[in-house]
Image (cartoon, helix red, strand yellow):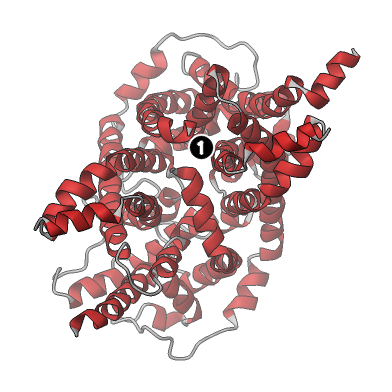
Amino acid sequence: MSRFFSGLRDGVGFDILLVGAALLFLLALAGAPLVYNVLMSFQQVDMFTLGALFRPFVGVDNYVAVVQQPEFWLVTRNTLVFVFGSMAGQFVLGFALALFFAQNFPGASTIRGLFLVSWVMPGLVVGGIWSFILAGDYGVLNVILKALGIIDANVFWKSDPNFSIWAVIIANIWLGLAFNMLLLSVGLAAISRDLYEAAELDGANAFQRFWTITMPMMRPTIGAVLSLGLIGTLQQFDLFPALTEGGPANTSNVAGYWSWQLSFQLYDFAKGATVSVMMFLLVLVASVVYVRSTRHEVRG
Amino acid sequence: MTRTYTPWILLTVALALAAVYLFPLYWMYVTSLKTGSEMFANPPTFWPNNANFGIYPEVWARRAMPTYLWNSVLIAGGVTAITVVLGTGCAYVLARYRNHWIDVGLFFVLMLQVLPASVMITPLFVGFNQVGLLNYPRTAVVLAAAAKAMPFFVVLVRATFMSVPRELEEAALVDGNSRVGAFFFIVLPLARNGILVCAILTFMSAFGEYIYSKSIIQSPSLQPASVGLSGFLGPNSTDWSSIMAYSAIYVTPILVAFVILQRRIVSGLTSGALK
């Protein structure tokens, strides 16, 4: 017994205690719910069986029912548009800004740091502000776009079925842009100046230097940033209730928000669990890419 | 001749870009001060004609903001406490060794980092219902949100521990310290700043937490400020000056803290998230 306690104080027992406490907590509140979620997707879960320990199994009925919902394919399409639209916008704009702020001028890192305020803002507040900016009648974005001559008539971003998903994408790009830029800046800063000087002496122009030095050297960073962007976008929830609530007629609904609506607005927990299992499979693909791309860095 | 001007031109462009990017924040503050008709004016005014500062105390009282904000502080404080107490030790062990088991643990943590809250909320709600935790809704939200925040915290703090030289800890052990002593008196003080920055980041994100609170907490007197805001924010909102005043009161403390700690936060993030 005393060996056990001295091990806790002075040996491997101490490590196991430290790591075990955290992992047990995570196992109970993240691992177990995940398994429970899969279990529920094969059960009949309604208001009557919600508190029951054993519920009737229904096989794949929930999955069939979810796929047969009229909005299923619309939501699938929206999820893909939302994910890839947001990722592309965040990455391209983030990369452009990172390249700009990699130039040597006074205050570059301080001004770049200011961009990150978007990242610490509560998502619901960001959604609220963009909801006002994107308003059809009196939104400031329409006024600016009209003044620039880009559009002739007001675009009803939130209520036009053709644009509603883009309203959320615009807000999400704003939200995630700064984090992308920051991570890409770190990658850019790690590239040796000597390479550029050597290329310049050899007569390579700016475009050639970008294409033959920057891009190849940035490959691992780009992989990690893209997978983090995918994960961040799949985790986005707060913008939907603030901007469109998935509407009009589900034209801006995505899997995460739909799953929540099924569970907490229609109280159909089985279907909510089923949709989130489907979404989890998508997240799994993203996380494998992410873990693979950060493995070397994280093991350090 | 032109060379010497280039940095200043770049600085001007940078300031312009920052102004465009931060415009939504400016718009929040300006809109909160506008009165009824000016809010919907076309073209909009970019500076309020007669600023109505009275909206702040009015919204503060009418929307019961002290209660909501206090709940936000309680929830964020609870989440941060659990995350720091459990996560720091875990990050330390994952940074200290390199073997097969550590790889498995890291993989587990990284996988949990990617789980969306919208996937977790359904099983958490049903599970909490079964074990009776829904009767203590704020505690339930704290537990759920801490599990969400911890993996990210562990990954960031682990990078901090990696930068603490192993030799210092080994020297302490040679001098007769126990492992516990070396951890608390040598390693922790050296990693203090990194841990503090990550704790602040955890607090900030838990302060804005929405989905768990919205789903789990039914009673308005226990809800945090995010749920309070959602009560009058939606696709058809019109009371914009109140929404913006509420938002401004809600986020200004976060923004001030961020601007003060900006340099540390940025360096903490860049060393952990990607390096």
Q: Nearer the viewer, residue A256 or A184?
A: A184
The chain carrying label 1 is B
Q: Residue A198: percent from the left, percent from the top?
A: 19, 54
Q: Nearer the viewer, residue B203 or A63?
A: B203
Secondary structure at badge 1 equals helix
Is B154 placed left or right of B132 in the picture? left
Q: Residue B41: percent from the left, percent from the top?
A: 34, 81
Q: Is residue B75 visible?
A: no
Residue, x 45% and y 79% (percent of image)? B30
Is A160 placed left or right of A22 in the picture? left
Q: Quadrant of the C terminus of chain B?
A: top left
Q: Is residue A29 visible?
A: yes
Q: Nearer the viewer, residue A210 or A38?
A: A210
Q: Tell me: residue B68, above or below residue B145.
A: below
Residue, x 21% and y 46% (percent of image)? A215
Q: Tell me: residue B256, above or below residue B98.
A: below
Q: Tell me: residue A102, above or below residue A270.
A: below
Which residue appears farthest toward the bottom when viewing the image? B50
Residue of label 1: B117
Residue, x 41% and y 73% (percent of image)? A107
User: Which picture quadrant has residue B180?
Assistant: top right
Q: Amino acid at mark 1?
A: Ala
Q: Residue A141: percent from the left, percent from the top?
A: 28, 69
User: Which picture quadrant has residue A36?
Assistant: top right
Q: Across the whole image, how many numbered discs are drawn on residues?
A: 1
Q: Tell me: residue A192, above or below residue B33.
A: above
Q: Residue A194: percent from the left, percent from the top?
A: 26, 54
Which residue appears farthest toward the right when viewing the image? A2
Is A38 placed left or right of A214 in the picture? right
Is A58 placed left or right of B137 in the picture? left
Residue, x 65% and y 77% (percent of image)? B57
